[in-house]
Structures are given as C-alpha cells and as structure tokens.
Amino acid sequence: MVYVTGNRLTAEINRQDRLGAAIQKQQAAVSSGKRLEVASDDPVAAARISQLRQAEANDAVWSQTITLARSLASQADGVMRALADHMSRAQELAIAAGKGDASSSDRDVMAAELRVMADDIDSLSRTTSSLGKPLFAEGDASQLRFDGDTVFAPVPSRDAVFSVDGTSLADVVRTMADQVSAGGTANLAAVVSAAGNAVDHVAARTAQIGVDAARIERIDNGRSARAIAVAEERSALEDTDLTEAIARLSAQNLTLEAAQATFARINRQSLFDLLR
C-alpha cells in the first residue's frame, strides 16, 4: 500500500513539474511574442517560417533594386525634359529660318544659338547617375534584375537616346547650324526636316522611359503586396496569439494551484491515515 501511494505521489510530482514547465513556456511565449522557441515545437511551421524569412530577405534586395531603378528613371526623365526643350527650340529656329525672310545676320545668330545647344546636348548625354556612372550607358543599356524572372534596363543606352540614324543629336544640330548660316532654299528645307525628325525621336524615347517607369511602379506594387502576404503568413505561424495564450496560461496556473493544494493536503495526512 505504501509502495502504491509512493508511486502516486511521484507521478503527481512529475505531472506538476510538466505543468510548471508548460506554464514557463507559455509565459515565455507571452513575453517574447513568439510561440515557437525551438523548431521542435512545431517542425512543419518552423520549416515554413524559414522559407518565409528567405523570401523576406530576397524581397529586401529586390526593394533596393526597385528604389535604384526608380531613381535612375526619374533622373533620365529630367534629362529628357531638358533635351525635349532644346529640340523644341531647335525646331522653332529651323522654322523661322525656313521662312526665307531672315537676314544673313539673323541666320548667324540662329546658327550660334544652335551650336551652343549642340554643346548642351553633348553635356546631357554625359550625365552621371547617382552611382557615379554614365546615366545613359555607352554600348548596351545597363539592365537590372527586379525579381527571379524580370530583367530590363530602366534607362536606354546613350546611342538609343542621343543618336538619330547613326548620327548624334548634337551633330545633327551642328549640321542644322551650318545649313542655317549658309542659307539657300535646299539647306533651309533640310534644316526643317532634320528638326522635325529630331523632335519625333526625342518624343519617342521620352515616352519609352515613361513606359519603363510605369513598369517599375507596377513591379513595386506587386512586390509590396507579396511582402504584406508573406509578413501576414509568418506572423500567423510565428507570433503568439496573446488572447489565447493568456487564457491558456490562466487555466494552467489554476490547474497547477489546485494540484499543489491537493498535494499539500495529502502530504499533511499521517502514515496511519494513508494505511487505513
């Protein structure tokens, strides 16, 4: 009988120890805000959380790329606005010269303005990005990777923007200046045509940069949506449900207190009481 009673007491002590450990674990979950202390608490959830953490790390890299691309596209848009203003002015001068009623001195003034404009266009083509590199790359345009599958150049190459049919825009404008200065019906007609082609070219490249900028925004919107979904799933797997955890902790404390009270009453009994 004593042996049986001893076993029961030992079992009760072990049960209370387990309950105390469960309470400590629950308290840790409440204080830390994380329901998983070690992977063995929930191996499946732990594996998924690891995947989600990797996804968040990748997202941080893609976010930096998008920020850079947005900055480059914005800078390129500013350059294109300045370039468009130059070409619009060049067209105005070409049309004014093409009327045929401008004097030789007037045409020289127009030609001088066009030559200054050509130098400005050369300067724009050499614009440096925030990375300290040419904004409009020589050769192929600089491409960026936005996610596992999306790679494209947010800014066109220098030739794509500042060349028309293999001739640089600056040289086109210099040729226009020479033709304006020389005068003559054929020269002035050529100036008007060249100015129109240049304006159309710049407008098309500006529009393409705008299309790519809009694409960057769509990519960023998709990335933001994915980031929110990943964060929500990770929180659901990893974070403590405080309402549930506090309720469970309260119930465990009550159970432990009741068990301890009962255990204390039993221990107060005499050996004679236990043997009766």
Image (cartoon, helix red, strand yellow):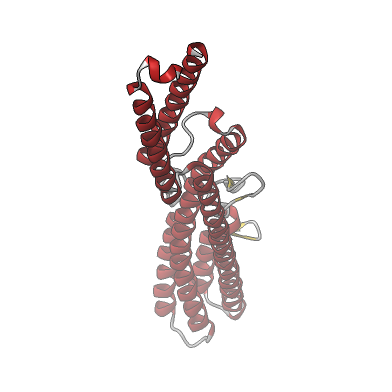
| Residue 38, placed above or below residue 130 | above
Of 167 and 267, the residue lying toward us = 267
In the image, is 72 to the left or to the right of 272? right
Q: Is residue 197 above or below residue 2?
A: below
Residue 135 can be seen in this image: no
Quarter that holds the C terminus: top left
- Report whether residue 88 is seen: yes
Residue name at image x 45 percent, y 72 percent: 85
Quarter holding residue 164: bottom right
The residue at the point 38 percent across, 27 percent down is 263
* Foreground of the two, 245 or 264: 264
Camera-side residue: 186 or 239?
A: 239
| Depicted 33 relative to depicted 135: above or below | above
- Classify residue 51 as left or right of residue 83: right
The residue depicted at 38 percent of the width and 43 percent of the height is 250
Q: Residue furthest front?
A: 276
Is 95 or 274 nearer to us in this picture? Answer: 274
Quadrant hosting residue 261: top left
Residue 241 percent location from the top left of the image:
45, 48
* Residue 215 drawn at (x, y percent): 58, 61
Image x and y of residue 205, in percent: 58, 64
The residue drawn where x is 51% and y is 76% is 91
Up-down relation of residue 33 to residue 21 (above or below):
below
Q: Total of numbered circles in the picture? A: 0
**x and y percent of residue 25 in the render?**
42, 32
